[in-house]
Amino acid sequence: MKHKLTKATNEGRMSSFQKMVLVVCVALSMLDGFDVLAVAFSASHLASDWHLNGSQLGALLSAGLFGMAAGGFIVAPCADRIGRRPLVLLCLLAIVAGMLASACAQTLEQLVALRVMTGLGIGGMMVSVAVIASEYASDKWRSAAISMQSAGYTLGATLGGAVSALLLARYGWRSAFLFGGISTALVIPLAWYGLPESLDFLIARRPQRALDKVNAILRRMKQDTIDELPRIEDSREASAGSDELTTAPSLIGLRTLLIWLAFSLVMAGFYFVMSWTPRLLVQAGMSASQGVTGGVLLNAGGIIGCTLFSLVSGRGKLRTLLTSALVVSGVLLLMFGANASQLQFAMPAAIALGAAITACVGGLYSLTPLLYPPKTRATGVGWAVGMGRLGAIAAPLLVGMLIDHGWQVHHLYYLFAAPFLLAVIPVAAIFFFMKRQKHWRHSDAVEAV
């Protein structure tokens, strides 16, 4: 029997407070998008000022991603011990310090180290944000909510990219990092007020005054307070996992390896497109401003893709939407590579490509929290995202080396179409094994997959 607390949260109508939590999650996700694009949009200016070759530029682009991977592996699991909310606030402080210090960097080595530091904060924060978005959304709208949270990435990249383009032209590359640091500092009060602790964490870990904290959240949700915390068994039953599914070692290892592989492939392709496209469009014959415009359009398309994914996922099956997005992304990369030098084709195609690849990332973020119970959810999601960041690290480094060895722009896009198409295999396998489990066949939370 489900406890009335978890039943109201998962099956009831979403309150204005729950919606506000999701808005805060979107705002925090915007920082991730801007941070990655701050270096991508500054790449041409940095390369010119510091005379960087392709390999050095690739190392710089990968530094922040390395920090994000380490944040997913090392920092994010701390949320399962100290709580999601405290970790988010600590990570925000680290991001502010890293961005502001990056604006003052004097050497490539200093900037690389500071990019790693900033990435640690972002990597640790984004996992908790994704978990909170998942836990405060109702069953019906969970995939849509996480997808909209992912849309914050592209929204931040688009708005930040547009502002950065103006700042870069007038004040140089340092201004982009300064703007990012100040913007992050302004978000901290919003997170302090609008981001609650995870209900699932309070129930599963039961820290001091857990009941008081749960009731404070329930009052903000306009729900009746409770006299005692739900039994752990009730909490597990209401979560996306089941005892059978979450305790069998073979199933844990299998689904974990599959989601790691899917994240690694998709993130490699995603960060190649987002990090290198502004620079590659310039190499294909466009101006620096046109390259930045291409990057902005990619992220504008990402907003469209996540929005459509969110609207459709509340009514359709996650497995169909995610698989379709992966196939479409691979095909569009092939087409984009063949026509990257044609301005009239490349700009509209950038919107479609951004929509497709961002929908892939949103789909994986929607799927991953369903695979782990509340007590270890941040760890499970953090490691999956961390593995994805490893793929993201490899992509810019590989592209930098390939450029130095004479690879043409279209060949690079052909190469990175493969990860999206290959990711269909582990994603299909995950859904197959989910359906094989008795719990998943009868769970309303996963019936939409």
Image (spheres, helix red, strand yellow):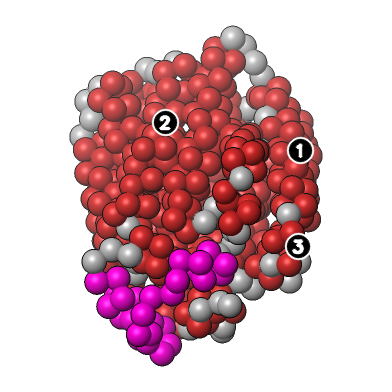
Residue at 76% x, 45% y: name it.
428
Image vertical order of residue 108 relative to residue 330, above or below:
above
Question: Do the CB atoms of the residues marked 1 and 2 lie less than 8 Å apart?
Answer: no
The span picked out in magenta is: 209-238
Q: Is residue 21 left or right of residue 102?
A: right
Q: Is residue 201 magenta?
A: no
Residue at 76% x, 62% y: name it.
441
Residue 85 at x, y = what percent?
32, 61
- Residue topped by disc 1: 425
Question: Of 83 and 400, which appears nearest the observer?
Answer: 83
Judging from the image, what secondary structure is the residue with disc 3 in? helix
Residue 432 at x, y = what percent?
78, 48
Alpha carbons under labels 1 and 2: distance apart: 26 Å
Q: Amino acid at mark 2?
A: Phe
Residue 447 at x, y = what percent?
73, 66
Residue at 25% x, 52% y: name it.
90
- Residue topped by disc 3: 441
Classify mark 1: residues with Cα within 10 Å, few (<14), some (14-19) or many (20+). some
Q: Which mark is residue 321?
A: none
Asked whether the viewer can see residue 51, the reply is yes
Q: Is residue 185 left or right of residue 390?
A: left
- Residue topped by disc 2: 66
Asked whether the viewer can see residue 354, the reply is no
Q: Is residue 117 left or right of residue 442?
A: left
